[in-house]
Amino acid sequence: MSALTLLLIEDEPQVRRFLRSSLEPAECKVLEASTGEAGLEMAVSRHPDVILLDLGLPDLDGLEVTRRLREWTATPIIVLSARGQERDKVAALDAGADDYLTKPFGLPELLARIRVAVRHAEQRGDRKDAVVSVGDLRIDLANRVVTRSGEEVRLTPIEYKLLATLVRRAGQVLTYQQLLKEVWGPRYSTQKQYLHVYMGHLRGKLEHDPTRPRFLVTESGVGYRLKSE
């Protein structure tokens, strides 16, 4: 547990005080944010090891915060919420949370959940890069901004989702089926024409010569890969 940085996104001051005073003796560094937007900004700038997230925030629902975090990072997210219904837990886990604790909870249980989350993250080898650069392309996953040679490139939601999926696994070959399921959903897993059309759009916007792509490369008969130089 030592030397861990925890980001606590919680709007109730008394809960923040309790958790800070409880976790710091365990040699954890506790960063605090009282709103969802502040928490998102801190996640980008401070690279915490674990995020402790309340669902009932004043500006953004915790589920939205979770979804936005999952667009660019696999940092473990443990939801701490007074919402104890099964549907709330399922919604949080479906949005990308790793674990869910219902308030009130005991400190030993929270510490155990943090240890498990960190162990799983280490086993996965999760990356925490919010900004990925490939050649003259710069993809800011946290802010959903893509630039080429310093100029912002406007992408449609589907184009961005396709690019972000490739960026998060840069260097790996993703099959047509994998990309279709992640970007369009399981019902579209055989609709390769969608993928070919949108990959053509992306290449037209991001490659200097779309007919000879340097970054968004085809693995013939298999799928696509974002090639890092």
Image (tube, rainbow, N blue to C red):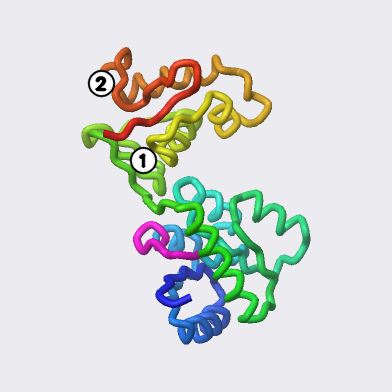
- Which sits in the foreground, 22 or 228? 228
Residues drawn in magenta? 42-50
Residue furthest front in the image: 123
Q: Position of residue 145 (x, y in %)?
A: 36, 40
The quarter of the picture where the C terminus appears is top left
**Disc 1 crowd, CA 10 A, few/some/many (<14, 14-19, 20+):** some
Q: Position of residue 47 (x, y in %)?
A: 39, 61
SS of the residue at dot 1?
A: strand
Residue that label 1 marks: 145
Kind of residue at badge 2:
His
Residue that label 2 marks: 208
Q: Residue 48: say if magenta.
A: yes
Residue at the image point whose x is 34% and y is 47% from the top: 131
- Which sits in the foreground, 66 or 227? 227
Q: Specify whether 92 is left or right of 147.
A: right
Picture mark count: 2
SS of the residue at dot 2?
A: loop
Q: Position of residue 157 (x, y in %)?
A: 49, 32
Quarter of image, res 228: top left
Residue at the image point whose x is 43% and y is 34% from the top: 172
Residue at the image point whose x is 41% and y is 51% from the top: 127
Q: Specify whether 61 is left or right of 9.
A: right
Kind of residue at badge 1:
Val
Q: Residue 67: say if magenta.
A: no
Q: Position of residue 128 (x, y in %)?
A: 40, 53
